[in-house]
Amino acid sequence: MVMICLVSAKNAPGVTTTTVALAEIWPRPVLVAECDPRYGDILAGYQQGTGDMTKGLLGLAAIHQRSDITQQVYNFVQPLSPGSEARLLAGIQVPAQAAGVAALWEPLSHLLPSLIVKRRPVDVLVDCGSLHSPHAPLPLIRNADLVLLLTGDHLEHIRAAHDAVQTLTTHLMAARPYADPRWRLAAVVRPSAAQRHNNRKAIQHTLEVDTIAEVRHDERVGAELLGRRHLPGGYLRSAYMRDVKILQASIDQQLSRPAPAARTGHLSLPAGHGEAAHVG
């Protein structure tokens, strides 16, 4: 069982879409935790309003105000889609609700990585939205087995991602001070068009973290994934979903790497901390 947090540095270039797409093809029991503090898209988009709005963070937060939620989490999940084995812990519907659920981030950061249902371990994909949103789920990010930073390939996206790497590194190091924080951090490139502005290798060189996959923009699938009624036939065989399958395999590969030796000193951040290098 693992907890994987997906986050963006600037706005949220496909974080929810990528999370849902991964859940659709995930090879093991999986729960999507919609923890974007701005608002959730899945109930209104992917589920087209057919989901249960009482099952999610808001209901769990109400329980948390008066009792322990250790045995309660799975009572507030629902199928990600009809007939799907994937499950959803639905998020908030408007940004004003973020403050009310923020108290859940700390207990969930310990409960979700060890989630077992009917004696089966469950992997958790956490949609964290933008790193810099108010009430961002930072405790979940700190305790994640892997953090995926999604970025576009324009220079302004890469600059924002470079700065986000420094922020994420600090948070990850706070949770496990003697482990290399970049071992639990990887980047995913989401080009906005067929024409590449900067390639994956150059982006990895600038970010100085493993850039494990590229999920190409597909307007017919990616942009419509949260409006499930409009998905084209055979979309699971589309180039977009092939990229998502490659991403899923790359995630498993990252998670299966041997743990690095424990650090005895402080992490040395690269020169130019806080400033993105130019990518040509």
Image (tube, helix red, strand yellow):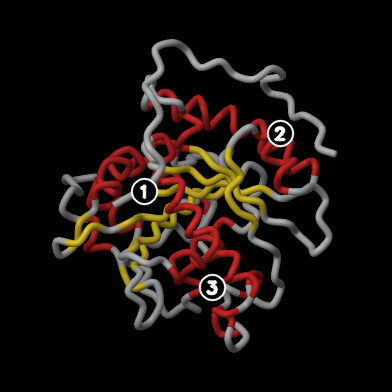
- Residue 168 lies, in percent from the top left, at 53, 32
| Disc 1 packing (10 Å; few <14; some 14–19; many ≥20) | many
Residue picked out by circle 3: 45
- Label 1 and label 2: CA atoms lie apart by 26 Å
Horizontal relation, residue 236 to residue 253: left or right: right
To which residue does mark 1 refer? 3
Instruction: Please state which of residues 66 and 13 is positioned toward the viewer in this rendering.
Output: 13
**Element under disc 2:** helix
Sequence-first disc among 3 and 2: 3
Residue 100 picture location, percent across and down: 39, 46
Residue labelled with disc 2: 206
User: Along the line of sight, which residue is nearer the eye, 107 or 142?
Assistant: 142
Q: Residue furthest front?
A: 258
Residue drawn at x 71%, y 48% is 200
Amino acid under disc 3: Gly
Counting from the top left corner in percent of width and height, residue 96 is at 50, 50
**Which quadrant would residue 56 be assigned to in this image?**
bottom left
